[in-house]
Image (cartoon, rainbow, N blue to C red):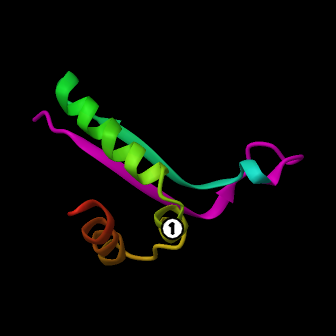
Amino acid sequence: FPYTTLFRSRFEQPVIFDPEDREKDARVFFALAAVDEDAHIKNMRQLFKILSNEELLEKLAHVSSPQELAMLDDQYLGG
């Protein structure tokens, strides 16, 4: 059935996009899925909120369990 979500994934080892510039390495990735335009805009707003918060991004880079991720969602995004 159709659903709307903002999916977050963290890799144990960083993905290296440019060996010459390790600042481009990434461990946290996001994917959006939406049933309609309004839901997509809502997801984009939530993603912007996440990407604008350096403290939250740092914590997401070190999450080690679904429980920790849920705690961060509650703390920073209101569940």
Is 12 colored magenta in this rendering? yes
Expressed as whole percent of the image width and height from the top left, the position of residue 9 reads 45, 56
Is 77 colored magenta in this rendering? no
Determine the residue positioned at 34% across, 36% down.
44
Most foreground residue, 16 or 69: 69
- Amino acid at circle 1: Glu
Name of the residue lying farthest toward the left: 1
Most foreground residue, 3 or 58: 58
Residue that carries the numbered disc 1 in the rendered image: 55
Occupied quadrant, residue 54: bottom right
In the visual, does 24 lie left or right of 49? right
Expressed as whole percent of the image width and height from the top left, the position of residue 3 reads 15, 38
Q: How many marks?
A: 1
Expressed as whole percent of the image width and height from the top left, the position of residue 41 reads 27, 30
Element type where label 1 sits in the image: helix
Most foreground residue, 15 or 53: 53
Expressed as whole percent of the image width and height from the top left, the position of residue 28 reads 53, 56
Task: Using the image, determine if residue 42 lies above or below residue 57.
Answer: above
Determine the residue positioned at 32% across, 40% down.
45
Name of the residue lying farthest toward the top: 37
Q: Which residues are magenta?
A: 1-22
Q: Which quarter shows the N terminus?
A: top left
Q: Which quarter shows the C terminus?
A: bottom left
Determine the residue positioned at 89% across, 46% down.
20
In the visual, does 2 lie left or right of 25? left
Occupied quadrant, residue 8: bottom left
Dot 1 alpha-carbon crowd within 10 angstroms: few under 14, some 14 to 19, many 20 or more: few
